[in-house]
Amino acid sequence: MKCQFCHQDVDDPCHNAQQMQQRAVSHVERCERALQSQQDAGAGAHRRDVQGNG
C-alpha cells in the first residue's frame, strides 16, 4: 500500500499524522523524512501568510 505521508509503497502505512509522528520518534527513516517535509511546508506557508498580511 502507498503511504499518504511518505508516498512510499510499504506493507504497513501510517493511517494518520499522529501515527506518522510516533514512528518518526522511533526513528523510522521514511516517517522522519515525511514529518520534516510537513514541518518545512508548514513553515513556508506561515512565512507567506505573514508577508502577505504586512
Image (cartoon, grey):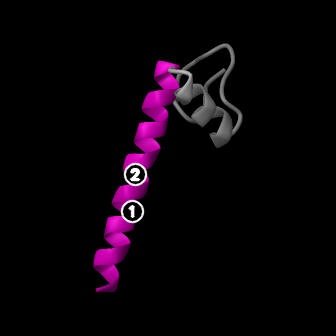
Q: Amino acid at mark 2?
A: Ala
Residue drawn 62% across and 31% down?
22
Q: Gap between marks 2 and 1, in whole Å?
A: 6 Å
Q: In the figure, is residue 5 to the left or right of 45? A: right
Left or right: where 35 falls relative to 2 = left
Q: Which mark is residue 41?
A: 2
Q: Is residue 12 above or below residue 40?
A: above
Q: Position of residue 20 (x, y in %)?
A: 60, 33
Q: Position of residue 18 (x, y in %)?
A: 66, 40
Residue 3: quadrant of the picture: top right
Expressed as whole percent of the image width and height from the top left, the position of residue 36 reads 41, 38
Of residues 19 and 12, which is closer to you in this image?
19
Q: Is residue 47 visible?
A: yes
Residue sitting at x 46%, y 20%: 29
Say which residue label 1 marks: 45
The magenta segment is: 28-54
Looking at the image, is 12 positioned above or below residue 39? above
Residue at the top extreme of this rendering:
11
Q: Which mark is residue 13?
A: none
Q: Is residue 48 magenta?
A: yes
Quadrant of the rendering where the C terminus is positioned = bottom left
Disc 2 element: helix
Mark 1 is on which residue type?
Ala
The quarter of the displayed image where residue 15 is located: top right
